[in-house]
Image (spheres, rainbow, N blue to C red):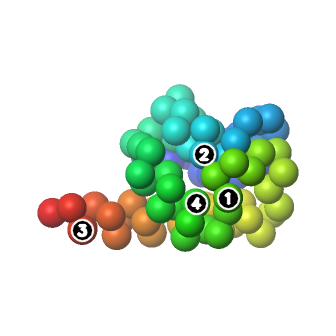
Amino acid sequence: MQRGISAGSFGKAQKAIKECLLDQSIVAGIGNIYSDEILFAAKIHPARLANSLTATEWSRLAAAIPQQLAYLSKRTK
């Protein structure tokens, strides 16, 4: 699913991190609700610019994606 979420993936983008997560050419399978849950878990505001995230925030985001996708997929069954 993911090739490694990091500043290299879209960290130079001058658009909101939520918009980056919704970009299916970068990360496939993350929709609107999932992106909200992921960003909430990572404690990152959806309107933050991707290029303004710190290394710590990138780490939290990278950890939150698989955790939240696993949790949410179990909840929907």
Q: Distance from label 4 to label 3 (Cα)?
A: 18 Å
Q: Distance from label 4 to label 2 (Cα)?
A: 8 Å
If you read the primary sequence from the N terminus, does the residue marked by circle 4 or circle 2 appear first? 2
Query: In the structure shown, which secondary structural element does the residue marked by tag 4 occupy?
Result: helix
Most extreme residue toward the left, as rendered? 77
The three-letter amino acid code for the residue at tag 1 is His
The three-letter amino acid code for the residue at tag 3 is Arg
Lateral position of residue 22 relative to residue 54, left or right? left
Q: Distance from label 2 to label 3 (Cα)?
A: 22 Å
User: Is residue 57 visible to us here?
Assistant: yes
Q: Are marks 4 and 2 in contact (CB under 8 Å)?
A: yes
Lateral position of residue 32 relative to residue 59, left or right? left
- In x, y percent, where is residue 26? 57, 35
Q: Callout 1: 10 Å neighbours few (<14), some, many (20+)? A: few
Q: Callout 2: 10 Å neighbours few (<14), some, many (20+)? A: many
User: Is residue 8 visible to us here?
Assistant: no
If you read the primary sequence from the N terminus, does the residue marked by circle 4 or circle 3 appear first? 4
Name the residue at 56% across, 66% down. 40
- In x, y percent, where is residue 4? 60, 51
Q: Distance from label 3 to label 1 (Cα)?
A: 24 Å
Where, quadrant-wise, is the C terminus in this rendering? Answer: bottom left
Q: Mark 2 sits on what residue?
A: 18
Q: Quadrant of residue 44?
A: bottom right
Name the residue at 49% across, 32% down. 24
Q: Mark 1 sits on what residue?
A: 45
- Marking on residue 39: 4
Q: Distance from label 4 to label 1 (Cα)?
A: 7 Å
Q: Callout 3: 10 Å neighbours few (<14), some, many (20+)? A: few
Q: Quadrant of residue 72?
A: bottom left
Q: Mark 3 sits on what residue?
A: 75
